[in-house]
Amino acid sequence: MNRRWFKGDTHLHTTNSDGSLHQYELIERCKKIGLDWIIITDHNYNTVDKTYSSDGLTVIQGQELTGYGGHINVWGKKIPFEPPYKIDDIEDYKKITEAARENGAIVSVNHPFCSNCPFRMDINKYPMDCVEVWNSIQHSDNTRNLKWWESKLLEGIHLPAVGGSDFHRDYAKIDFLAMPTTITHAKSNSPEDILQAITEGRSVVTNKPNTSMIYLTAEDAELGDSVELGNGITGQCIATKLKPGFTLRVFNNDKIIYSHTATGFEKEHKAVFGIKEKGFIRAEIDYTLKGAFKKAFAALELKFFSAKNAATPETADELFWAFTNPIWII
């Protein structure tokens, strides 16, 4: 089946909730950085009345259901209730999101282990179509999201992962839009094809639109597919734009079956490896902060990504720059 890679952002805010840009200002910014699709997810508000295309950029309807218990993105269809919502407990949340899913919407739990606004309900009992593993610029909370998501994969749960910039505004003249970028392998950038690709696990999440990419296959299987283990099954991984010190790792379940650390800039690195266990394979690019960068990172986390009056957050010495969804080995 012919598919192409389409760059997008799943989590964006405008002046209709607490963002700094008007809807159409945001759309123009997204076009300039080369995105193919976006989902506008203002808090408890339907900014996009109906999904549409703007000069080739697909603008998908969305909303971030926001309450003390947690933040949940609803994509593709409207929430069939008018705010203010009653969202005092998990049953209130489920009533709203399940009604939206019945209308064809997709539900994603956002930044579940965020230091400031975590998912305070039982995440293991919440019905979701995917989970936001990477929220905003890279920080320690995302490593906790990734570890939880990996634990679900190891349980055999087919739970797709996405990233979203949660863009509200730029800080210190730094462009935070599409950091990270979710790149979907879809038939087209129509809303139906993009959302289908997301829910099938056909996505790579990377730091920003024009940085590293990971292409992972196992025989003829691609991300989101299943392939029989068989005898002598092999996989291939191509990673692009590896910076010095970046490490490409390929996992077969929780085991690293291939690892390569770049000593200089590598435009492209190719790997071929054997697959020995049923379960899944996935790939990620990691990096380690050292010296002044590590100290600056810790200060940034303390200022922007820690709950008020909380202790200094645990600094993640090793962060991820890009990761794939799995290919399932049966």
Image (cartoon, rainbow, N blue to C red):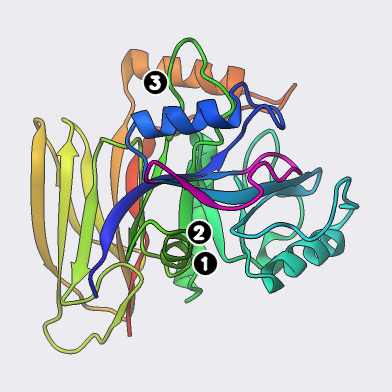
Looking at the image, can residue 230 be seen? yes
Q: Position of residue 186 (x, y in %)?
A: 34, 63
Q: CA distance from mark 2 to mark 3?
A: 25 Å
Q: How busy is the neighbourhood of tag 3: few (under 14 within 10 Å), some, or many (20 plus)?
A: some
- Residue 49, above or below 294: below
Q: CA distance from mark 1 to mark 3?
A: 30 Å
Q: Position of residue 92 (x, y in %)?
A: 86, 60
Under circle 2, the secondary element is: helix
Residue under pointer 1: 152
Residue under pointer 2: 149
Kind of residue sitting beneath label 2: Trp
Membership of 42 in magenta stretch:
yes
Q: Residue at x 51, y 50 (%)?
A: 52
Under circle 3, the secondary element is: helix
- Residue 316, above or below 67: above
The quadrant of the rendering that contains the N terminus is: bottom left
First in residue order: circle 2 vs circle 3: 2
Q: Which residues are magenta?
A: 41-56
- In this rendering, the label closer to the viewer, 1 or 3: 1
- Residue 324, above or below 157: above
> Is the stretch drawn in magenta largely helix, strand or loop?
loop
Kind of residue sitting beneath label 1: Lys
Res 294 label:
3
Res 171 label:
none
First in residue order: circle 1 vs circle 3: 1
Q: Do tag 1 and tag 2 residues touch (Cβ < 8 Å)? A: yes
Q: Position of residue 136 (x, y in %)?
A: 51, 34
Looking at the image, can residue 137 be seen? no
Q: Do tag 2 and tag 3 residues touch (Cβ < 8 Å)? A: no
Membership of 125 in magenta stretch:
no
Indicate left or right for 14 with 7 as reference.
right
- Residue 224, above or below 35: below
